[in-house]
Amino acid sequence: MSTASTQLEAIHSMLSAGHRSIRMPRHSLILWGIAGCVLCLATEHVITPTRFPAHWVRALALLLFLALVLSGVALADYQYTRYRISARDESLPFAQAQVTKVWWLLVSMGTLFTFATAFFGGGYMVYVIWLVLFGLGIYVHGLFSEQILEWVGVLMILLGIGALALSVAFPTTQWLAASAFGLGMPLLSTMLDRGKYKSVRIRVSQSALWLAVVLSPPLLADQLRRSLDAPDAPAMSLESFQRLEELRSPAVIVIPPGSRVPLKVRVGGGLVENGGETILPLVLAKPLEIALVDGKPDGRFRVAGGQWKQRRFDMWIEQVQFGGTLTPSAGPAASLNLALTVGH
């Protein structure tokens, strides 16, 4: 029985190797992974408002920076792959050439999407989109090469979609993408087995190991960020704060529910004239704590005694609906509905 099982497994391996006629070079995973990790962590420090004050200039600089780095990586990967193939007196398989074109297309789509967010919004999805695109590229390559690439490619896609569905904070998605590229892709290169057949149990174990390695750094970074966000300052009621003439020491102001918060709104653009500020009264439904430094809010807040959050990362405006009416009696009227959401 064992001899028959061994023969069947050998036949299955030969059939699988015949169908999976191309190989993912280990150096490609390492090269693209390191480049992706560096771009995730370094781009915001290279393309800064200080260096490029104008918005459109900063967007163009980002496009050129990404295009220069990624095209350089693509060229280096392509040339070294051809060199390795020539050294073995082989030719580049047709299927591998086509899969490489798909990979370049996905990288180009990610670059253009990143550039477009500078004008049309959605920048909080940048790292999620790159995760999904890289995962799709690895999955497509795995269809023609090695099974483990399919498993990891699906995991990268699910990580990106899951981070978006769970409203993960923007810095955490940044660390998640950097970890998936910088740790996950080099680790994947060590799991390549040249198309050999492996049982589902082994593939699940490899995927679990890969997932654990990739998720550990962003989870630790998220916990560290939340611990650093908590202000070390005494709490003070809103009434006590309003009785002070000036407050220079750090403090946490507790605003009770039912408090009216004026919202200043200014609307302009090509369709309407730039007018003055309109004040809309907002009424708090839950108690809100705001951290003050040098007498000014520093962006940290928490709702109803929950975890401390950052305004720029953990607060979104969703479900924006703009409408209007036009009647003989009332004339033109416009309406705007939106939801203010605080991240988990």
Image (spheres, rainbow, N blue to C red):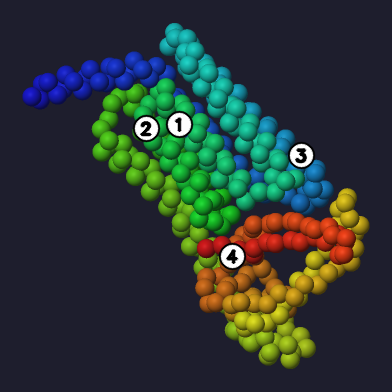
- Gap between marks 2 and 3, in whole Å? 38 Å
Task: Give the foreground label among 2 and 4.
Answer: 4
Q: Which mark is residue 139?
A: 1
Provide the secondary structure element on which disc 3 rests: helix
- Gap between marks 3 and 1, in whole Å? 31 Å
On the image, numbered disc 3 is attached to which residue?
60
For the residues bearing labels 1 and 4, Cβ distance under 8 angstroms: no
Q: Residue at x 77, y 72 (%)?
A: 280
Left or right: where does residue 115 sit relative to residue 85?
A: right
Q: Earlier in the sequence, mark 4 or mark 3?
A: 3
On the image, numbered disc 4 is attached to which residue?
342
Q: Earlier in the sequence, mark 1 or mark 4?
A: 1
The N terminus: image quadrant: top left
Q: Position of residue 245 (x, y in %)?
A: 78, 88
Q: Residue at x 66, y 48 (%)?
A: 122
Q: Residue at x 72, y 46 (%)?
A: 120
Q: Position of residue 318 (x, y in %)?
A: 64, 58
* Viewer-nearest residue: 80 or 335: 335
Q: Earlier in the sequence, mark 2 or mark 3?
A: 3
- Gap between marks 1 and 2, in whole Å? 9 Å
Provide the secondary structure element on which disc 1 rests: helix
Q: Earlier in the sequence, mark 2 or mark 4?
A: 2
Residue type at mark 3: give it: Leu
Q: Position of residue 80 (x, y in %)?
A: 53, 20
Looking at the rendering, which quadrant does residue 150 occupy?
Answer: top left
On the image, numbered disc 2 is attached to which residue?
148
Provide the secondary structure element on which disc 4 rests: strand
Left or right: where does residue 40 sit relative to residue 327?
A: left
Task: Give the foreground label among 4 and 3.
Answer: 4
Q: Earlier in the sequence, mark 3 or mark 1?
A: 3
Looking at the rendering, which quadrant does residue 38 occupy?
Answer: top right
Residue type at mark 4: give it: Val
